Amino acid sequence: MEIFLTLAEELHFGRTAARLHISPALVTQTVKKTERRLGVTLFARTSRRVALTEVGRCLRDDLLPLYQGIRVALDRAELAGRGITGTLTVGFMGTQAGRFVSAAHNVFERRNPDCAVRVIEAQLHHHATQLPDGTADLLLLPLPIEEPDLTVGPVITRSPRYMCLPTGHRLAERAEISAEELAGETFVGLPGSVPAYWTDFHMPRHTPGGREFHRYPEPCGTYAEVLTLVAAGRAIAPGDAQLPLLYQRPDVVFAKVTDLPPVEHALVWRTSDDPDKRIRAFADVVVEIAPALTPPNATLTGASPRTG
């Protein structure tokens, strides 16, 4: 069937053989054998041209949809064997992570048509809880992650630390500042659902020199709440290189912090799902599309997976 349909398209024995990676003699033998079996001539052949006969055209038209259906069935069986089926739920924390996940969603579904992707948002108050509670299969969020049952996969970006300040702040005119200059400031507060190690990394209790920071008593569960609190002049908030690119508003400014560790964003999933081929396939797509979407001042890493 494949030889007949390819020759019906190419109308050239040599090109048909090359396309199917077989010998021209096999193409000729197969056509002659088929014609003898059916008792009809399928191709009118001369030394200069090959053309379908009327019977050949009818056979081509009848076989083509059947052949395409067989190919679809075989492709689906192959995808099922690879485990790339069903629905994968992917969450993101932050606008930049959302851009990565959205772009990867489109590419992944084109390549794996039998696996749907559902995209959800992870807010600050969720942290990584959407993995153990089953709400998400995969998350793209800021590190660190130190949960014993979660795997930290590819680290997608590494970015300098930025600080969000109200426009009336004493350092608001500065493009770069140090943590020491922020000593005594009040960071926003986060809910108890966010692990202390994560909060302390992003909003340390002391400067590198040992001077104290404070925490606002009321927690913010979303970054919109964070920006509102900062704009009111009640607190300051940390972030990364996506802030000046994607979170601009007239009542806050962003300054790079020169003496705090960078912020990394990574893909995270349940360690029990390590064998899930969908997880690895989606992670590979995120790594692939990330260069075109990475904000200025951030770098790509592609670090190897490790267990949290």
Image (spheres, grey):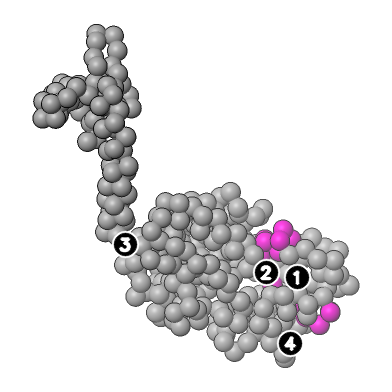
* 10 Å crowding of disc 2: few (<14), some (14-19), many (20+): many
Q: Which residue is mark 3?
A: 83
Q: Earlier in the sequence, mark 2 or mark 4?
A: 4
**Image mark for residue 164:** 1
Distance in Å between CA atoms under marks 2 and 4: 17 Å
Residue drawn 50% across the image and 62% down it? 155
User: Magenta span covers which residues?
Assistant: 232-246
Q: Which residue is mark 2?
A: 239
Assign a secondary structure to mark 4: strand
The local crowd at label 3, few if under 14, some if 14 to 19, many if 20 or more residues have their Cα within 10 Å, is: some
| 215, above or below 117, in the image | below
Q: CA distance from mark 3 to mark 2?
A: 37 Å
Which secondary structure lies at badge 2? strand
Q: Mark 3 or mark 2: which comes first in sequence?
A: 3
- Dot 3 and dot 2 residues touching (CB under 8 Å): no
| Kind of residue at badge 2 | Gly
The C terminus - image quarter: bottom left
Asked if labels 1 and 2 touch by Cβ distance under 8 angstroms, the answer is yes
83 inside magenta stretch? no
Label 4 sits on residue: 216
Would you call the spot at circle 1 few (<14 residues within 10 Å), some (14-19), or many (20 or more)? Answer: many
Question: Where residue 46 appears, x then y in whole percent?
Answer: 24, 10
The residue sitting at 55% across, 55% down in the picture is 103
102 left or right, relative to 216: left
Q: Nearer the viewer, mark 3 or mark 4?
A: 3
Residue type for callout 4:
Tyr
* Residue 237 in magenta stretch: yes
SS class of the residue under badge 1?
strand
**Residue 209 visible in this rendered orientation of the protein:** no
* Amino acid at dot 1: Cys
Report, in whole angstroms, how far the alpha carbon at label 1 lies from the one at label 3.
43 Å
Q: Quadrant of the N terminus?
A: top left
